[in-house]
Structure formats: C-alpha cells, structure tokens
Image: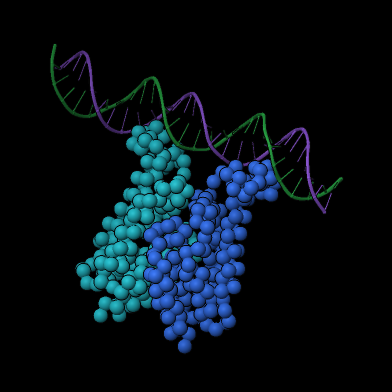
Chain colours: A blue, B cyan, C green, D purple
Amino acid sequence: MTLERVAIEAGVSKGGLLYHFASKQELLGALLIDTLQGADERLEELTLGDEPGAFARAYLEYVRTGEHNDRGVATGIFASAALDEGELSPARAQFTQWQDRLVNHDGLDPSVALLARVVGDGLWLIDLFGLASPSDQQRDDLIELVLGMLDQEGV
Amino acid sequence: MTLERVAIEAGVSKGGLLYHFASKQELLGALLIDTLQGADERLEELTLGDEPGAFARAYLEYVRTGEHNDRGVATGIFASAALDEGELSPARAQFTQWQDRLVNHDGLDPSVALLARVVGDGLWLIDLFGLASPSDQQRDDLIELVLGMLDQEGV
DNA sequence: GACCCTAAACCGTCCGGTTGGTACAGTAAA
DNA sequence: TTTACTGTACCAACCGGACGGTTTAGGGTC
C-alpha cells in the first residue's frame, strides 16, 4: 500500500493525492473512518422500526451476503492500520459504540445481544481475511438461527 | 515489524536472525505457522472425550479468557501476513480444517457447529485487534449461552 | 486570483538483504 | 595431543532500492 499505488488506483497523481491528505497516516485514517462510516450508515438503513432487537437484526443482515467489503481494499486498510500503533483507534471507537447500542439500548438480553454482535463481527472478520468463509447456505442458516433467538428473546 | 526489531526482541542480531530465516517472508511464515500450531495443540488439549460437540466446546473454551494471544505479537504477525499477498494461506488452511472438523466431524447440527466456530473466531479476532472486547463477565455469559445450545443439540 | 489539480524531478531515510569475518564445537588424521 | 579442517551459529558493517514526502513549474476552471 504505497502512496503511488493508491494514487493510481484513485486515478489521481501522487501530488494530487498529497494535496488532500498531508501524509500517509492521514490518508489511512481517512480511509478507515470512511469505511467505518459507510458501515454505520448501512446499518442505520437496515435498522427497521424500533422494537427490541431491531439493531441486532440489522447487524446480522449486514453480513448476510459476503459483499460487504471490496475484498482487498478494506483488508489492506484494516491490516495497515493494525500495524501502525494507535491507528486503529477509530475502529475501536466505532465498535465500542455498536457494542453499547446492541447491549444496552436494543432492548435485548445482554448475552443474546452480545451473541448477535460476535456472530456479526465474526463473519465480517472471517470474510475480511478470507479465513474459510462459510458457504452462502451455511451462512444463511446460521443467521436464521441467531435471528430466531432474537425473536424468542423479544417476546 | 522490521527485521531489526524482531532480532532485538529475540535477543539476536539481524544477521543472526537471517541465518535462520533466509528472508522476511520465510520468518513471517514460520511465525504464523508456529502461532497456528500452538493454537491447534491447545485445542487438542482442551478437547475432552469424543461425545458430540467435544471439539466445539474446546473451541469456545479456548477463547474464554482473553489471554490466548500475546497481544501485539500475534496481531503483528497476522496483520503483516494479511498485507503480503498469499502469505495468509497457512491461516486459511488451518481455519478450513477447524471448520471442517466442527461442521462435519463433531456430531452436531451444522448450524450450531458453525455458530460455535463463528463465536470462537469472532471473540478471537475481536481480542486480537482490541475491537471493544467484551468484559470477562459478558464473555463468560455468552460462552455459557452457546455451550447450553451445544448441550441441547447433543441430546 | 483562488482552488484543484498534473507532472516530474528530487531528497533522505528506512529497511531487506548481502558480505566478510569471528567464535566455538566437534572430529580426525599426523 | 597437537594440528588442521569442517560446520554451525552468530555479528557488524555495508549496499541498494523502495518509498514517504518536498519542491517546482505549470495548467485548467470557476
């Protein structure tokens, strides 16, 4: 992930890239924040109504298809950030917020809420790094299983 | 993660390090494989008996405490490997094997088996990157919840 | 003229990898 | 039991290329 490669990928000159982002760190931070915001907005769209578990359902829905990441791009951003000390903190903040919303403000039993979160994050990270992603069928079945638990809980 | 830093960490000179590992790639590969093997052996230890779900239980037990990684070390290895194209393949292979064992050879309903896997991996990866790890209490409750589902299934 | 770039040369540093050498342990003929 | 040689384990110093970042000179558009 060099500046030149990013510039070419973005159809911009290296100078133009550095016109917008003063340093590679700044670029990386912006990329990461942008990715996280995109996910957050998508989650908001998927959150239907305000009955208990609405956000948890969105969280699972988000990872139902494996398309939630332009493989390689998000992976690179995430891995690069993980190597630069402290560079991952926007991600930490975002996940903390999601976790708080799921566990404390979604009207679910905390353990079930955490289950939804960990399954969602688990699938997301497994896909992100390509660590033996389950098939579409398996994934669907798993999500249905967890959704079922949310329903039981919501009653 | 530079060769020099690794060398210092290991109490060796850079030259000495490269005597054992001909290139950085080779070093990284060995580090990754070693980490994975360590986890695999630990899982084997934790697998008690051979009733249905024995391996799934071990998988969850493994991530019960957050101590399963020398934070920073495993993170660096994993993130570095993720950036080098193809360098993550030993990890993919290992996860594929675990997934196969869980889903096809542990005597559980496939969805429940996958649930155990995704919860295990989810917690592991969340810890690895420090993405808002749940508290010990929350983690324990979650694991108990999933273990309970394995028991229901096993009957 | 302010803004948003392109293009290209350039610099300094960092880092992977190479090289030549040292220390030492074994071993085996003289 | 000295001598000579071999292999293993290491180190310090160096080299060269890649890459982050700067600078300069300019061009198009509102």
Task: In the rendered view, tell whether residue B45 sits above or below residue A28.
Answer: below
Q: Position of residue B47 (x, y in %)?
A: 25, 65
Residue at position x 54%, y 76% in the image: A55
Determine the image quadrant of residue B122: bottom left
Residue at image location 32% in from the left, 65% down from the top? B59
On screen, residue A119 above or below A9: below
Report the number of discs: 0
- x, y percent for residue A107: 52, 82
Among all residues in the image, which is located at the extreme bottom?
Answer: A155
Q: Which quarter of the figure has residue C13?
A: top right
Q: Residue at x 57, y 79 (%)?
A: A48
Question: Which corner quadrant holds the C terminus of chain B?
Answer: bottom left
Query: In the figure, is residue B19 to the left or right of A62?
Result: left
Which one is in front, A85 or C1?
A: C1
State the residue at coordinates (50%, 63%): A67
Of the pair D12 and B55, the residue shown nearer to us: B55
Residue A109: horizontal and vertical position, in percent? Answer: 46, 80
The answer to whether residue A24 shows anywhere in this view is: no
Residue A56 at x, y = what percent?
50, 75
User: Does residue B29 lie above or below C25 as drawn?
Assistant: below
Q: Quadrant of residue B56?
A: bottom left
Question: Is B112 placed left or right of C28 in the picture?
Answer: right
